[in-house]
Image (tube, rainbow, N blue to C red):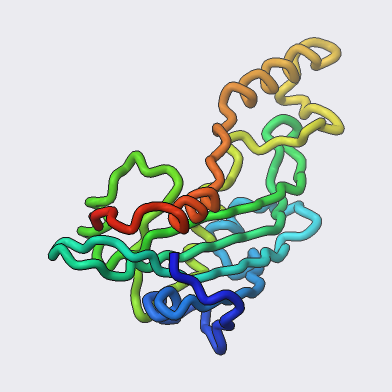
Amino acid sequence: MTQHPGKPAGLVDPRAFDLFEFARSGRQAAGTVRVSQLPRMLNEVPQEAPDRDTAFTWQAEGATQPELQDDGTEGPQPYLRLAIHGAAWLECQRCLSPYEQAFNVDATYRIVNTEEEAEEFPLDEDEVDVIVGSRQFDLVDLIEEELLLSLPLVPKHDACPEVHESLSSGASGLEGEETVKGEAEEGEEPKRPNPFAALEGLKSGESGDKKH
């Protein structure tokens, strides 16, 4: 993959920037976004949380990979790497009290021009996602989308201080706690493969892959 290490992004508006140029020139950018800037994510934070406006740091890097085009010629295929780190308060489904959930997102995206191109991309490709690029790309919206996808299926403490009475049965409430715990474990989302491993493969892989 063609990269330009250390090349800064300059003045980049994360709400509206040229994603194609960002990738083609191998630029980098970093910043901070708060939960208050992410309305859908804010809806997941309980009102009684100690802090409803926590911050996430993000880092983005553009790159290109030579690939075979539909017309038989080789051309640069743009890619985007995005990392997001931070935490937000969620409501534990076992004790119904707020707890702090860590988020660590590492994602790689193949940038295409149209929705039609995105739909043609193989659905079984787990290591690289597809996004439709634009000259006015909203990176904050992509960050929010990744955070929502990273929400736990059953938000819960590792160890609750106590189980809410509505979830307990019997005098001690232990039976109810075990039942909820079992349901949570069964419903946990499987670990997502590290997308950055795909980048290493792209760097060393063949350049003759046909573009979809």
* In the rendered image, the vertical position of residue 52 relative to residue 193, given as above or below: below
Residue 9: name its quadrant: bottom right
In the picture, which quadrant includes the N terminus? bottom left
In the rendered image, the quadrant that contains the C terminus is bottom left
Residue at 58% across / 22% down in the picture? 186
- Residue 81: image location, x then y, percent: 51, 63
Using the image as rendered, state which of residue 7 and residue 40 is in the foreground.
7
Q: Which residue is drawn at 37% across and 68% down?
A: 78
Image: 12 above or below 33: below
Q: Which of 177 and 7 is in front in this view?
A: 7
Considering every residue shown, the one lying at the far left of the view is: 71
The reply, left or right, for residue 200 in relation to residue 152 is: left
- Is residue 70 shown left or right of residue 176? left
* Residue 155 coordinates in the image, percent (x, y): 65, 38
> Which residue is more in the foreground, 179 or 190?
190
* Numbered marks: total: 0
For residue 132, what is the image quadrant? bottom left
Please, which residue is most extreme toward the bottom here?
A: 11
Residue 161: image location, x then y, percent: 86, 33
At 42% from the left and 43% from the top, the residue drawn is 126
| Residue found at x 15% / y 63% | 72
